[in-house]
Structure formats: structure tokens, C-alpha cells
Image (cartoon, rainbow, N blue to C red):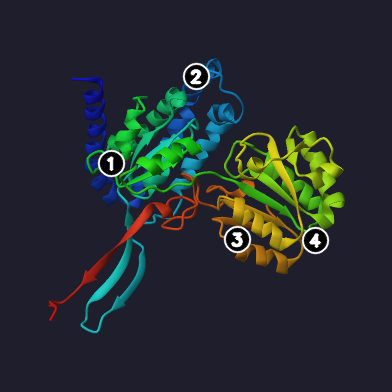
């Protein structure tokens, strides 16, 4: 047997096990799923030292290979991050069971009673990079929604993700659910991803990529099953002419610098020309003081000469670092036009005390998340009250914005009759 044949057999076995487990998970009541997730959260806490030891191995290897900056930040774990991970699993457990909800119901003239009822999607393949916490988030959300998950993390987080996965399996066993309900692909061969994208012989119902443009682009190109994804988070914050200065300074600094490596971090700052000196200068000074590199157009550089000249690529780059591109705009319509032209339909914000301007901004933009007077870093399922998220959907079909428990369901029609036949 060749290496490829062995890998194919290994992955097909994962798919078959997932498909077999799908019915048990689909039919599990909410109390059982909740018990599994609470036990998993407890296991994560109990295994903190083990998870940190595994993470240290991954981080050391990543540093040796030259990884730096935002990617290293995404990979690293701490006791606080592990606690947040466990809390996220508990928050998902506390969510209302999304399945079995009657979305609509009506009766036809012939007496047929028709109901549209929410139901799990089935087997979900989740492919991600660097962030080991996705192992817990994705596994928990998929399970709460009644789905089976096949998780494939990046090779750089193989030890960390494996340790977290062991805790999730401990939770499944505690509740009497099949261990195959949350599986982790331990093989780091990139061909394993290709096999998942092909659907593992019809066993995978949906693929969700969570990572950079390279990973997501590959998934969108090669997948033979439906995909729920976003390409990048090119998030904007617009300082309107009627923005409160103190609020604008506070929100903008948070939107960019709280965590620069997340997809909700502001990458482009638009400043209304009317407040360039009064608002723009102190905001730019705040960012620079916090260690942010500023790339700007000529108008901005005229008041802040330390800025690096911005090029066309800067308006369409997801930096994921302490770098921001800054541009002056002549009013609300020009800001909206810039975002529509360069944006990725992820998350965009307006800072203003003008309600009419805010409502125009919120209604005009076709982004998955639009905010008024709040940091773009709120683009997160946990902050939306979803417990956690698998990612942010920017497509037009199925799920947009944070993908949580409810978004990982579909529906079926349940038709009840009394012997009707069609003429």
C-alpha cells in the first residue's frame, strides 16, 4: 500500500465513523449534549498543564521555523486563554437547542399540515490554521447544533489541538455520546485536506475553513461539497464629521490595537476632512504611541509627517499586524463608496453623534456586520451572545456574520396528512 493509499484509507475511515455517529448526535436530546459540553469544559480546565505543555512544543517549533507576529500570537496559549476556551464551551452549552424549532407552519386547503422544522446539517469538516482554540469552539458549536465535526488544524498547532481534542472526547464519553462525534485529523499531510474537500466518499455535508486567504482560497477552488467561508476581514472604521472626539479616540484605538491578529481588527481608518486636524491628529498620535505603523495618503501625512506613504495595495490589505492604512474622505458618501469598492463585506463601523448619518451608513453598506459607535473587535460570536463562533460568514447565502450554533442548522419540511392523494 502506498502512502497516499494509506492516507486515503485513514481519512475514509474518519468519514465513515462520522457518518455513523451522525444519527446518534442528531437524535441526542439537549440535556445529553449539554452534559457532554460541560464535562468537556471541566476536562479542559483539568488538563490546563497538559495543554500548555503541548502548546509550548508548538510555539517552540514555530519560532524555530521563523513564525513571528500575529501568527505566533494566534498560536500561543496561556492559562487565561485556556480558561476563556473552557468558558466558551460552557457558554455554548447554555445556548438554546436550535433543533426541532418550528420555523413556520400552515395548513393547505386539502387538509395537509406542513411545518418547516430546524434540523442539523450533518457532518461538518472544519479546516483551520494556527488557532488551537478553534478545536474547542468548533467542536462545541457543531455538537450543540446536533452535528458531527471532523477537525483538521494546522501542522503548527498539532500538539495543542490534540490535547484540547482529548478533553472534548472526554466530555463526549461522559455523556454517552460516540467519540467519533468530534474527530481530529492527526495526519499533517496536506493531501488530507484535499480528501476532506472531496467529501470523504459522500460523508461530509459542509466544509468550513478558518484561516488566511491561502487556505480559504484553496477550499473555495477545490471543494466538492458546500463551503461556508470568508476570504478576509478588511474592516473599516470611519470618523464622521460629527464624531465625539473622546469616544472616537477610545474606540479607534481598541478597534485596531486590542488584538491586531483577529479578523475583526480595523485595518483601514477613514477620517472626514472636516475633522482631520481636530480628531485625526490625536487619534493618529494614540495609534503611534501604542506601536502602530501608520500608512497614509498625502492629506494625512500633511498633518502627521511620520506616516508612511500609502499605496493602492494598502487599501485592500488585511494586515493582521500593528499596521493601519489611513485615508481622508470628503463626507459620508465618499466613505461608503470607498468601503464598497475596497471592503470584504466583513465588519465596518461609523463613529458619529449624527443619527441620520449613522442610519445611512448602516443601511447603505452590504457588510455582514455594521456598527455605530462601537469597536469592530465586537465582530465575534461570544460578544454577540452566541457563546463562541466558528468564524464570520461574509457570503450572501445561509449564514452571515458570526457562525454560531443556530447557523449550523438547516431545515426540513414535516408534512402530516389524513390519507390525501394528489389528483
Residue appearing at x 22%, y 38% in the figure: 16
Give SS at disc 1. Answer: loop
Pointer 1: residues within 10 angstroms few (<14), some, or many (20+)? many
Q: Is residue 13 left or right of residue 268?
A: left
On residue 365, which mark appears?
3
Quadrant containing the C terminus in the rendered view = bottom left
Q: Is residue 319 left or right of residue 387?
A: right
Please report contact status of discs 1 and 3: CB closer than 8 Å, yes or no: no
The span from disc 3 to disc 2 (Cα, nearest Å) is 45 Å
Residue linked to disc 4: 242
Q: Is residue 288 left or right of residue 12?
A: right
Give SS at disc 4. Answer: loop
Q: Residue 201: where, in percent of width, then height? A: 22, 40
Residue linked to disc 2: 53
Q: Is residue 277 left or right of residue 116?
A: right
Residue linked to disc 1: 199
Please report contact status of discs 3 and 4: CB closer than 8 Å, yes or no: no
Residue appearing at x 60%, y 40% in the figure: 318
Give SS at disc 3. Answer: loop
The span from disc 3 to disc 4 (Cα, nearest Å) is 19 Å
Looking at the image, tell me whether mark 4 or mark 2 is earlier in sequence order: 2
Amino acid at each position: 500500500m502506498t502512502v497516499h493509499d494509506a492516507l486515503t484509507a485513514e481519512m475514509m475511515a474518519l468519514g465513515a465513523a462520522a457518518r455513523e455517529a451522525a444519527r446518534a448526535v442528531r437524535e441526542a436530546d439537549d440535556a445529553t449534549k449539554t452534559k457532554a459540553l460541560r464535562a468537556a469544559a471541566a476536562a479542559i480546565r483539568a488538563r490546563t498543564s497538559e495543554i500548555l505543555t503541548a502548546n509550548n512544543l508548538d510555539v517552540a517549533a514555530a519560532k524555530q521555523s521563523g513564525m513571528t507576529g500575529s501568527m505566533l500570537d494566534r498560536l500561543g496559549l496561556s492559562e487565561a486563554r485556556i480558561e476563556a476556551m473552557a468558558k466558551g464551551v460552557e457558554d455554548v452549552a447554555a445556548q438554546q437547542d436550535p433543533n426541532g424549532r418550528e420555523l413556520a407552519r400552515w395548513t393547505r386547503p386539502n387538509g395537509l399540515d406542513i411545518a418547516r422544522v430546524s434540523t442539523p446539517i450533518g457532518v461538518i469538516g472544519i479546516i483551520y490554521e494556527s488557532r488551537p482554540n478553534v478545536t474547542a469552539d468548533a467542536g462545541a458549536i457543531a455538537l450543540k447544533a446536533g452535528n458531527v465535526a471532523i477537525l483538521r488544524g494546522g501542522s503548527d498547532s498539532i500538539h495543542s489541538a490534540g490535547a484540547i481534542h482529548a478533553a472534548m472526547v472526554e466530555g463526549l464519553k461522559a455523556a454517552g455520546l460516540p467519540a467519533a462525534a468530534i474527530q481530529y485529523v492527526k495526519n499533517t499531510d496536506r493531501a488530507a485536506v484535499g480528501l476532506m474537500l472531496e467529501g470523504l466518499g459522500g460523508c461530509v455535508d459542509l466544509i468550513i475553513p478558518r484561516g488566511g486567504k491561502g487556505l480559504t482560497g484553496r477550499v473555495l477552488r477545490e471543494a466538492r461539497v458546500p463551503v461556508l467561508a470568508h476570504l478576509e476581514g478588511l474592516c473599516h472604521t470611519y470618523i464622521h464629521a460629527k464624531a465625539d472626539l473622546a469616544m472616537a479616540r477610545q474606540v479607534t484605538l481598541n478597534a485596531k490595537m486590542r488584538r491586531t491578529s483577529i479578523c475583526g481588527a480595523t485595518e483601514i481608518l477613514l477620517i472626514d476632512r472636516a475633522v482631520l486636524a481636530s480628531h485625526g491628529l490625536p487619534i493618529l498620535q494614540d495609534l503611534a504611541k501604542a506601536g502602530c505603523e501608520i500608512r497614509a495618503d498625502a492629506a494625512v501625512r500633511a498633518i502627521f509627517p511620520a506616516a508612511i506613504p500609502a499605496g493602492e495595495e494598502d487599501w485592500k490589505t488585511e494586515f493582521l499586524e500593528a499596521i493601519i492604512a489611513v485615508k481622508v474622505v470628503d463626507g459620508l458618501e465618499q466613505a461608503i463608496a470607498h468601503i464598497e469598492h475596497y471592503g470584504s463585506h466583513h465588519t465596518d463601523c461609523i463613529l458619529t453623534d449624527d443619527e441620520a448619518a449613522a442610519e445611512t451608513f448602516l443601511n447603505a453598506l452590504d457588510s455582514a456586520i455594521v456598527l455605530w459607535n462601537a469597536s469592530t473587535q465586537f465582530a465575534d460570536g461570544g460578544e454577540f451572545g452566541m457563546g463562541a463562533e466558528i468564524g464570520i460568514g461574509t457570503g450572501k447565502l445561509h449564514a452571515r456574520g458570526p457562525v454560531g450554533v443556530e447557523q449550523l442548522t438547516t431545515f426540513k419540511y414535516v408534512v402530516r396528512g389524513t390519507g390525501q392523494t394528489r389528483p
